[in-house]
């Protein structure tokens, strides 16, 4: 059940963001505006501005910002609805709850998939799942573990599951909407051990499956549904958030059994992207609860590659985070093998965690060969494109010690032929981006011409955020040169391609507009542009979620 929008707006009118900021960090309020030490990254000088008039905050250091409810979410590690309820409690405000059509639909699907999960769990406890139980025993998991982790089993023949669904009024269409069928209409989880995938409210939203036969992929996840988004959802066990808060760090592993292995070794603060590559959205989710994240991917080439890829995406998330690697003994492929072998000294291994960037540099040296210093440094140049200025400086110092070359020489080498090497890299990336943007613009303008320059809501948003696009459109509209019109009329695209083009353009020009607005802000005096910045940031977040 959701909280009514009107109730949220009424509460926002009564609440003051300063009440929450000044009770959680050091700051000063002058009138209805103030500055404070940002609690989301370490600092000694106040860089977070806030205003009670609009109930907004923005940190110029870590770029975190939002409204009063976003602040409560971040400071208390809670979801949106709980943040509203915390604010309501403080002001003794009575909230109104409502079931919108969308919320009712989501609630309905969550209730139904919970019952299907219970069916799978029941199956595991019956004789017909002996094969599954024996397999789990081989992996050092007993009946108590099966019960605690709510592991289930899906038979080869899905007839009984279909009959069960009918008995609880789940139609074939609803069964498909829950993501249990492939695109070809086949049941995904035949003869598989079932892992329930939950959201942070402990509601089942999807499933992972481990095949018990050799046909097809070993592991499979639910198809995307309105309640299960693969790039945003993680697999973890019930005490995940409690243990993250207790230990003040989270561990990310590759698969389902890796999560279970860590739990059996005493660490519940473990999550997995369910056997797929870790995404920016998943990393963002975890960073809401801690800024200390340890990676423990497989001890093989693919695992090392996945670890290095995190360096490439880490600067795309909204918070500053500290990333480390947990290095297992070489004889073990992953933490599952470590646990199943009977080893128990995991505390010692975790205490010897390595800085992620140092780990990547060590691996880079191994790949290129320590004796071939020039090759190592060429590889480092490419790697350093993903680092912040401070990270790059510390990395050069570390690399110098490893290669026996002083930092000044390495800095000179890094800038040598800069225009031909480093700048060329950025130039190529910039040209590639600009080429895409030009293509998107062509598709958008072509659609306007074909529709006599009639704007829908999304097109209006694009025109509003980009004066450049507005000028181009008006220029073509006022001077409809036949040759130019023919160029655009010959462009072909699908509705999906047009929709993506408009969204990509909105995101591209929104980022430019935010930077332009921030450049105009006097940190110590003016917060009048904050609402505009936050409005655009919300728009970016909304459209990113539609891609």
Image (cartoon, rainbow, N blue to C red):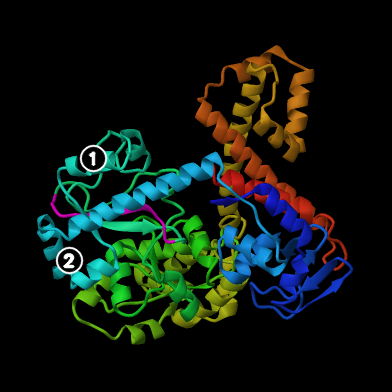
Crowdedness of circle 2 by 10 Å Cα count: few (<14), some, many (20+)? some
Where is residue 127 shown, x and y percent of the image? 10, 58
Q: Is residue 99 left or right of residue 145?
A: right
Residue 441 visible in the snapshot: yes
Q: Marks 1 and 2: in contact by CB < 8 Å?
A: no
State whether residue 41 is above or below residue 164: below
Q: Give the range drawn in magenta.
A: 202-214
Q: In this view, does 542 lie to the left or right of 233?
A: right
Residue 206 forms part of the magenta stretch: yes
Q: Is residue 71 left or right of residue 310?
A: right
Out of 524 and 147, give the one closest to the viewer: 147
Whole-number angstrom distance, CA of label 2 to CA of label 1: 26 Å
Residue 547 visible in the snapshot: no
Residue shown at 46% from the left, 80% from the top: 247
State whether residue 73 is above or below residue 329: above
Q: Mark 1 points at which residue?
A: 162
Residue shown at 54% from the left, 72% from the top: 291
Out of 417 and 279, give the one closest to the viewer: 279
State whether residue 219 is above or below residue 333: above
- How many numbered discs sit on the rendered protein? 2
Residue 408: name its quadrant.
bottom right
Q: Mark 2 vs mark 1: which is more N-terminal?
A: 2
Residue shown at 35% from the left, 34% from the top: 173
* Secondary-structure class at tag 2: helix
In the rendering, which numbered label is found on residue 533? Answer: none
Residue 446: name its quadrant.
top right
In the rendering, which numbered label is found on residue 136? Answer: 2
């Amino acid at each position: 059940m959701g909280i009514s929008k009107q109730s949220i707006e009424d509460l926002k009118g009564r609440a003051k963001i300063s009440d929450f900021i000044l009770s959680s960090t050091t700051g000063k309020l002058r009138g209805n505006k103030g500055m404070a030490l940002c609690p989301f990254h370490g600092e000694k000088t106040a860089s977070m501005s806030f205003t009670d008039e609009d109930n907004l905050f923005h940190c110029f250091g870590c770029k975190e910002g939002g409204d009063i409810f976003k602040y409560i979410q971040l400071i208390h590690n809670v979801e949106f609805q709980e943040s509203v309820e915390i604010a309501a409690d403080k002001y003794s405000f009575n909230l109104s709850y409502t079931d919108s059509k969308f919320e009712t639909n989501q609630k309905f699907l969550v209730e139904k998939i919970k019952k299907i999960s219970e069916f799978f769990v029941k199956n595991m406890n019956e004789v017909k799942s002996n094969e599954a139980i024996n397999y789990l025993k081989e992996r050092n998991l007993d009946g108590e573990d099966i019960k605690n982790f709510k592991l289930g089993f899906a038979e080869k023949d899905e007839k009984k599951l279909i009959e069960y669904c009918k008995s609880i009024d789940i139609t074939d269409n609803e069964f498909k909407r829950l993501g249990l069928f492939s695109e070809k209409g086949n049941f995904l989880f035949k003869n598989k051990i079932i892992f329930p995938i939950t959201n942070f409210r402990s509601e089942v939203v999807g499933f992972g499956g481990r095949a018990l036969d050799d046909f097809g992929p070993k592991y499979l996840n639910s198809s995307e549904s309105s309640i299960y988004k693969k790039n945003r959802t993680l697999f973890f066990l019930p005490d995940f958030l409690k243990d993250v808060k207790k230990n003040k760090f989270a561990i990310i592993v590759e698969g389902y059994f890796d999560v279970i292995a860590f739990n059996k070794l005493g660490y519940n603060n473990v999550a997995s992207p369910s056997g797929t590559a870790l995404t920016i959205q998943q990393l963002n989710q975890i960073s809401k609860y801690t800024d200390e994240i340890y990676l423990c991917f497989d001890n093989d080439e693919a695992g090392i590659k996945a670890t290095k890829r995190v360096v490439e995406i880490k600067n795309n998330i909204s918070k500053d985070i500290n990333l480390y690697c947990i290095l297992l003994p070489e004889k073990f492929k992953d933490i599952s093998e470590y646990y199943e072998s009977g080893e128990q000294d995991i505390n010692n291994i975790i205490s010897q965690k390595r800085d992620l960037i140092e780990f990547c540099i060590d691996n880079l040296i191994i790949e290129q060969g320590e004796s071939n210093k020039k090759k190592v440094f060429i590889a480092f140049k490419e790697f350093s494109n993903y680092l912040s200025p401070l990270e790059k400086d510390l990395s050069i110092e570390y690399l110098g010690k490893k290669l026996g070359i002083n930092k000044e020489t390495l800095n000179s080498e890094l800038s040598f032929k800069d225009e031909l090497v480093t700048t060329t890299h950025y130039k190529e990336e910039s040209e590639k981006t600009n080429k895409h943007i030009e293509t998107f613009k062509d598709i958008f303008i072509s659609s306007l011409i074909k529709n006599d320059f009639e704007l829908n809501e999304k097109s209006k948003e694009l025109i509003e955020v980009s004066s450049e696009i507005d000028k181009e459109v008006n220029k073509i509209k006022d001077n409809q040169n036949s040759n130019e019109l023919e160029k655009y009329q010959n462009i072909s695209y699908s509705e999906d391609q047009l929709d993506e083009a408009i969204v990509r353009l909105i995101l591209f020009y929104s980022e430019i507009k935010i930077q332009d607005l921030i450049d105009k802000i006097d940190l110590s005096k003016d917060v009048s542009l904050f609402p505009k910045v936050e409005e655009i940031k919300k728009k970016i977040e909304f459209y990113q979620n539609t891609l």
